[in-house]
Amino acid sequence: EVQTLAATALAAAGRTCGIRAEAAIVNYYHASTTLGGHKDDVEPDQETPIVSVSLGCSAVFLAGGEDKEEAPTALWLRSGDVMIMSGTARRCMHGVPRILSEDETVCCPPVQPDETAAREQDNGVAGDEVPVPSPEALSRVAQYLQNHRINLNIRQVFTSDSTTAHGESASPESDQREP
């Protein structure tokens, strides 16, 4: 679940702040696309970190300052990387000027069918009733990610003292849903 992923990433980075994963933005890139410089500044909550998960092709990520005058720092993001934007970085300019195709870098390690075939299967279901993909399906996903990038940005939208778009309290105490 996205909430668990975000909380686990924050804990692994030594962050003690909590996060309510109220939204996730999925950025999809073909190897020839980019994402221009911008700020993630529309959410009422600007204090809770954003947790960003990279899948597929590597990318150059530019992390700038609070305005376009400050020169950005280039970061290399690979498949499987998790980046946390917190503190001042949460409010800074950033963008993705370059996605590298499989010809330029190794995007994803190839799926080895013998590795997945060796996984324990019970009529295609394992563990908590999660279907185990076939080696062919995993191979198709890996092949797709050779020339594509998917970035999942997990964020808390509302502060604990604000209300949601539906007029409900955004505080955790008011959340009566089952986990």
Image: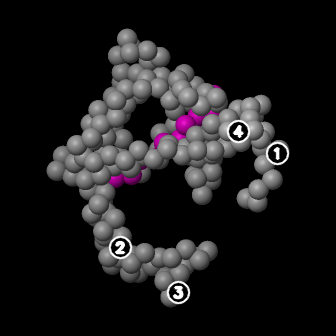
Return the disc, 4 or 2, that comes first in the chain's sequence.
Answer: 2
Estimate the x, y position of residue 17 in percent, counting from the top left.
68, 36
* Res 79 visible: no
Q: Closer to the camera: disc 3 or disc 1?
A: 1
Q: Is residue 1 visible?
A: yes
C-beta proximity under 8 Å, tags 4 and 1: no
Of the residues under marks 3 and 1, which one precedes in the sequence?
A: 3
Front-lying residue, 37 or 108: 37
Q: Tell me the SS state at disc 4.
A: loop
Magenta range is 47-56
Count how many numbered circles sit on residues in the image.
Answer: 4
Q: Nearer the viewer, residue 109 or 134?
A: 134
- Which label's residue is closer to the chain start, 3 or 4? 3
Query: In whole angstroms, how far apart are the C-alphas of marks 3 and 1?
Result: 40 Å
- The x, y position of residue 70, in whole percent, is 38, 13
* Amino acid type assigned to the residue bearing label 3 in the image: Asp
Looking at the rendered structure, which numbered label has been put on residue 122? 3
Tell which residue pokes out farthest to the front in this image: 166
Point out the frontmost of discs 3 and 4: 4
Q: Which mark is residue 174?
A: 1
Mark 4 vs mark 1: give the one in front: 4
Residue 146 on image: x %, y %: 26, 56
Residue 137, numbered circle: 2
Q: Is residue 141 above or below residue 33?
A: below
- Which of the marked residues, 1 or 2, is nearer the chain's N terminus? 2
Label 3 – label 2 distance at C-alpha: 17 Å
Q: Secondary structure at mark 1?
A: helix
User: In the figure, residue 118 lies in which quadrant?
Assistant: bottom left
Tell me how far mark 4 sits from mark 1, CA to CA.
11 Å
Disc with the residue nearer the chain's start (4 vs 1): 4
**Mark 4 lies on residue:** 164
